[in-house]
Amino acid sequence: MRKVVFTNGHYYHVYNRGVEKRDIFMDEKDYFRFIHDLYEFNDRNHVLNLNFRFKSNYGAPSSIVLDSIVLEKKKERELLVEIICFCLMPNHFHLILKQLIDGGISLFMQKLAGYVYYFNLKYQRIGPLFQGKFKAIEIDNENYLLHLSRYIHLNPLELIEPDWKEKGIRNWQKAIKFLESYRWSSYLDYLGIKNFPSLIQRDLINNYFKNPADYKNFIINFLPKDFNKIKDLLIEK
């Protein structure tokens, strides 16, 4: 992996996975904790209190949204990055980030590594959780960014069609239903379904589409040949 110099105002595909490809999210609470950390650690200021609780609008844990997280009051945040897209998978995660301040991405990822402390304490383990330092590649034009967002939002299909990248998606009806039930990415918010709306900045991608339905059509028009457009931005291998 080549070294990347992070520049303010530029976009990057950031990725990491569990050491030895182990799972880094074991249950729903782990996913929520990591999403909470994506929000809370995106701040130039120190995080004073990591205690948080979830308040459901619907009375069930599966209905929790980030806007309902009850956090201790603190001064206004100074964002390190904009999170354009994200996807959490059992053993890895993808982020599209825009750096806002000098050293913003490096500091954000350094703070996000605090998830390891939570995970090791919860599961009574020691040692590294992630496979070395995070990987990053610069996205040098917005067309690539759009296609990469599609790839990231399709990524959960690995759980039901492991060869979807190489052979295409055989059952689109099943795929669409699955993606629209998968909470651990930014896809639902791009469809206009409130999931974690406070976490991401959607304006850049939304400017290319008239409405959420157009973005959904962009997603489901994926073909295996589309990988050629972003193959240099894929860093999980």
Image (cartoon, rainbow, N blue to C red):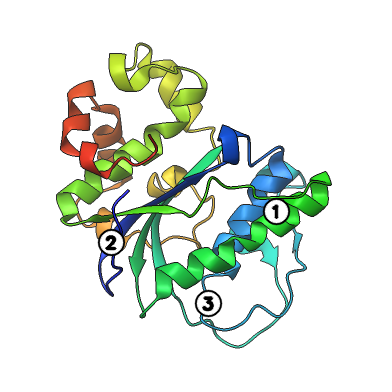
Question: What is the x, y in percent for residue 189?
Answer: 44, 49
Single out the residue that lies furthest toward the bottom: 75
Going by the numbered disc 1, the residue's amino acid type is Asn
Q: Which residue is mark 3?
A: 43
State the quadrant of the C terminus. top left
Q: Please state the total of marks drawn on the protein image.
A: 3
| Distance CA(mark 1)–CA(mark 2) | 34 Å
| Distance CA(mark 1)–CA(mark 3) | 26 Å
Going by the numbered disc 3, the residue's amino acid type is Asp
Give SS at disc 2: strand
| Distance CA(mark 3)–CA(mark 2) | 18 Å
Give SS at disc 1: loop
State which mark lies toward you, 1 or 3: 3
Q: Which mark is residue 57?
A: 1
Disc 3 packing (10 Å; few <14; some 14–19; many ≥20)? some
- Viewer-nearest residue: 100 or 14: 14
Q: Which residue is mark 2?
A: 11
> Mark 3 or 2 closer to N-term?
2
- Viewer-nearest residue: 224 or 213: 224
Give SS at disc 3: loop
State which mark lies toward you, 1 or 2: 2
- Write down the quadrant of residue 68 in the picture: bottom right
Q: Is residue 210 visible?
A: no
Taking the spot 46% from the left edge, 24% from the top edge, the residue there is: 158
* 6 lies left or right of 48: left
